[in-house]
Image (spheres, helix red, strand yellow):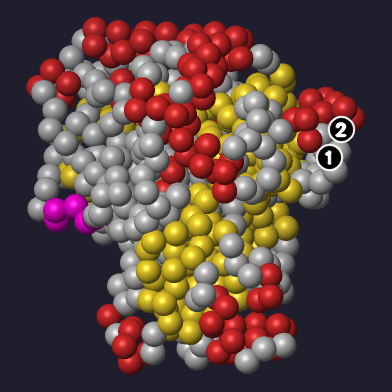
């Protein structure tokens, strides 16, 4: 059942306990037994455990349970594995229609194996498959035991859509897609079984340690038409008549987020939550909320929001130039907004993600313990998706004292941002998979954030980091901030929506105090990695917690009843509310430069994929002018106001950098 465990830090909030480097049922049973003992003992500070093939990832709160205290607890638990009896293995039967529309690749699998299709089906359905772990996506089981006789390579070009319930083969593996998603596995069948349902406890029908048995059935017996659409959003819609706010424009990407959902990573459900947790917590404390309440996360081009009731709000994180009713407002401060008031953003000055807190919190339904949105699987938030024009969100109730809060954080206490983002990291969990030269490169060189950065991961460009013998490992757990290095040697920082498990080496992990720094690094900006140890990481984290405590004191002791404080020096001469999905900043040129008109500028590097206007065209406010591909999305460039186009400064196919002028308007 494996030898002496290795203890591998995964940042300052997670520990990997590794029993070997092979896929073995006995080792896997030991992993699951350790998880059972630790979950049963539930030491203070334990967040959750995630069992994988040959290791257990333990997520913990270092402010309660220091890393140097966790390891002895785990060693003691490992010595007591005989004290826990694992549940008797269940055999979960999965009725499956093979071939035809349900399994379009069955003929190809049979041809490669030199068999008839019925022989492939008999072999595939003739084995009970051990579920080693869950991961990749919510409810996805990693199955072991498929016959090598029917092993088939993945598709050369993955499908953009694989239907929910599809049964596939990839190399020597077989599995079931619990939800609709892209995928490159060879599809040999489909089941009507709903593998994952947020309304079920636990949400996954299958768990690690179970066995899966595929049972061939005929299409007429399957009633495939009644197959539940497990790919449908599993975020609930808020009551339409609840008092709150109305979205007039969703911006580039605005979602409901809190501090994420814990306790379900073992079923493949990502934590999600705020990319810059400190900024969201600060915003909540400034308006008098508990720090974990749900707010809005706005990426680069903020939303336009009308408040249906009197509200107290604060905006923190990236400076997207917020304003109330067209007047620039100060950040890191609570403001009262009257019913009918409109919050908008004039474009990015610094940072990437802003956080909007409202007294009482954004009161969407709780899904799996959180209000956070995980858009890839449509879980949580508002209908499991980004906000759109017309959405209405309720605001939670708050006390009269909170409703009068006007807390403020002095500008000198705001998080510092410069041209280079220094990310402090704890080395591991697989730093021993890299050469000394590779580690030296990682810590000495600078890297550039690429446009291929989103809530799942932040891909960097720069010098290659050399492995000792390859990038692949037996899949294990992933932590927020893990720096993954694939076969091309390029680092990728795994972010809030990362998969719960992964099969690539992770050289280091960004410390929890610097996750917000990584989240605010925009494409084209520079990051450098700085090595710290666990004691230093914990001290830094405790300092950040102390700063939050000071914010809470400021908020609770601030005078009440004040009107909003506007930032007249913000430079936001024009508060443009027509930014739907537009990754750019507006340069509203006034005064001596008025003859140059109003210029729409790129807020980040990207590719111009479409230009829809010409010189002399008259456009309406919010009319689409062009489209830029950035951050894995095509983003509409919309007019900030009605007017006439004076100059078109870009063409289709052009690559633009941050601040590049795109469209110029004639002066008003």
Residue of label 1: 467
From the image, give the main secondary structure of the stretch colored magenta: loop
On the question of residue 584 being in view, the answer is no
Question: In what element is the residue under mark 1?
Answer: loop
Residue at 66% of width from left, 66% of height from top?
172
Q: Which residues are magenta?
A: 235-240
On the question of residue 128 being in view, the answer is yes
Question: In what element is the residue under mark 2?
Answer: loop
Residue of label 2: 435
Residue 236 part of the magenta-drawn span: yes
CB under 8 Å between discs 2 and 1: yes
Quadrant (top left/top right/bottom left/bottom right) for the N terminus: top right
Report x, y in % for residue 184.
62, 70
Residue 118, compared with residue 383, is above or below; it is: below
Residue at 63% of width from left, 35% of height from top?
2
Q: Which mark is residue 582?
A: none
Report x, y in % for residue 129.
51, 62
Report x, y in % for residue 39.
38, 30
Question: Which of the pair 316/442 is nearer the observer?
Answer: 442
Report x, y in % for residue 230.
35, 67
Residue at 67% of width from left, 60% of height from top?
607
């Amino acid at each position: 059942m494996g030898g002496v465990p290795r203890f591998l830090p995964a940042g300052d909030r997670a520990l990997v306990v590794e029993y070997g480097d092979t896929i073995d049922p006995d080792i896997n049973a030991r992993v699951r037994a350790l998880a059972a003992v630790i979950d049963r003992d539930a030491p203070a500070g334990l967040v959750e455990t995630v069992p994988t093939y040959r290791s257990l990832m333990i997520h913990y709160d270092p402010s309660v349970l220091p890393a140097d205290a966790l390891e002895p607890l785990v060693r003691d638990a490992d010595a007591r594995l005989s004290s826990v009896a694992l549940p008797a293995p269940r055999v979960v039967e999965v009725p499956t229609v093979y071939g035809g529309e349900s399994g379009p690749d069955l003929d190809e699998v049979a041809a490669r194996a030199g068999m008839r299709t019925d022989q492939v089906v008999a072999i595939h359905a003739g084995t009970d498959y051990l579920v080693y772990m869950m991961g990749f996506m919510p409810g996805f089981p990693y199955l072991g035991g498929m016959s090598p006789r029917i092993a088939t390579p993945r598709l050369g070009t993955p499908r953009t859509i694989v239907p929910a319930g599809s049964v596939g083969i990839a190399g020597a593996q077989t599995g079931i897609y619990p939800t609709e998603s892209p995928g490159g596995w060879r599809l040999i069948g489909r089941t009507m079984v709903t593998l994952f349902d947020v309304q079920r406890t636990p949400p996954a029908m299958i768990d690690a340690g179970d066995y899966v048995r595929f049972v061939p059935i005929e299409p007429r017996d399957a009633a495939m038409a009644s197959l539940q659409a497990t790919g449908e959003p599993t975020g609930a819609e808020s009551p339409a008549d609840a008092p709150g706010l109305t979205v007039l424009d969703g911006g580039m990407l605005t979602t409901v987020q809190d501090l994420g959902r814990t306790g379900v990573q073992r079923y493949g459900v990502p934590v999600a939550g705020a990319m810059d947790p400190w900024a969201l917590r600060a915003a909540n404390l400034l308006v008098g909320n508990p720090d974990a309440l749900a707010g809005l996360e706005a990426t680069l081009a903020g939303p336009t929001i009308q408040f249906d009731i009197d509200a107290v709000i604060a905006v923190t994180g990236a400076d997207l130039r917020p304003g109330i009713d067209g007047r620039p407002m100060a950040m890191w401060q609570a403001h009262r907004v009257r019913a009918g008031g409109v919050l908008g953003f004039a474009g990015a000055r610094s940072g990437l993600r802003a956080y909007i807190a409202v007294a009482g919190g954004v009161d969407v339904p709780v899904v799996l313990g959180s209000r956070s949105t995980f858009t890839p699987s449509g879980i949580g938030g508002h209908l499991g998706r980004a906000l759109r024009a017309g959405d209405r969100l309720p605001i939670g109730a708050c006390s009269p004292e909170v409703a009068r809060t006007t807390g403020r954080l002095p500008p000198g206490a705001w998080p510092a941002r410069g041209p280079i983002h220094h990310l402090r990291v704890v080395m591991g969990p697989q730093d021993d998979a890299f050469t000394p030269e590779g580690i030296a490169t990682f810590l000495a060189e600078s890297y550039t954030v690429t446009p291929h950065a989103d809530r799942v991961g932040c891909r960097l460009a720069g010098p290659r980091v050399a492995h000792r013998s390859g990038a692949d490992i037996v899949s294990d757990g992933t932590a927020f901030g893990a720096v993954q290095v694939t076969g091309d040697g390029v680092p990728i920082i795994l972010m809030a929506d990362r998969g719960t498990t992964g099969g690539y080496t992770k050289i280091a992990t960004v410390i929890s105090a610097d996750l917000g720094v990584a989240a605010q690094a925009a494409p084209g900006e520079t990051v450098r990695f700085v090595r710290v140890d666990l004691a230093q990481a914990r001290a830094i984290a405790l300092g950040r917690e102390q700063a939050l405590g000071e914010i809470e004191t400021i908020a609770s002791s601030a005078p009440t009843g004040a009107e909003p404080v506007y930032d007249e020096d913000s430079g936001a001469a024009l508060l443009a509310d027509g930014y739907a999905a537009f990754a750019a900043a507006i340069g509203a040129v006034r005064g001596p430069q008025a003859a140059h008109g109003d210029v729409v500028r790129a807020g980040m590097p990207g590719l111009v994929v479409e230009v829809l206007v010409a010189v002399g065209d008259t456009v309406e406010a919010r009319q689409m002018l062009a489209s830029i591909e950035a951050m894995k999305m095509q983003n509409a460039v919309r007019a900030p106001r009605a007017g006439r186009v004076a100059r078109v400064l870009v063409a289709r196919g052009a690559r633009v950098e941050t601040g590049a002028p795109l469209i110029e308007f004639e002066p008003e």
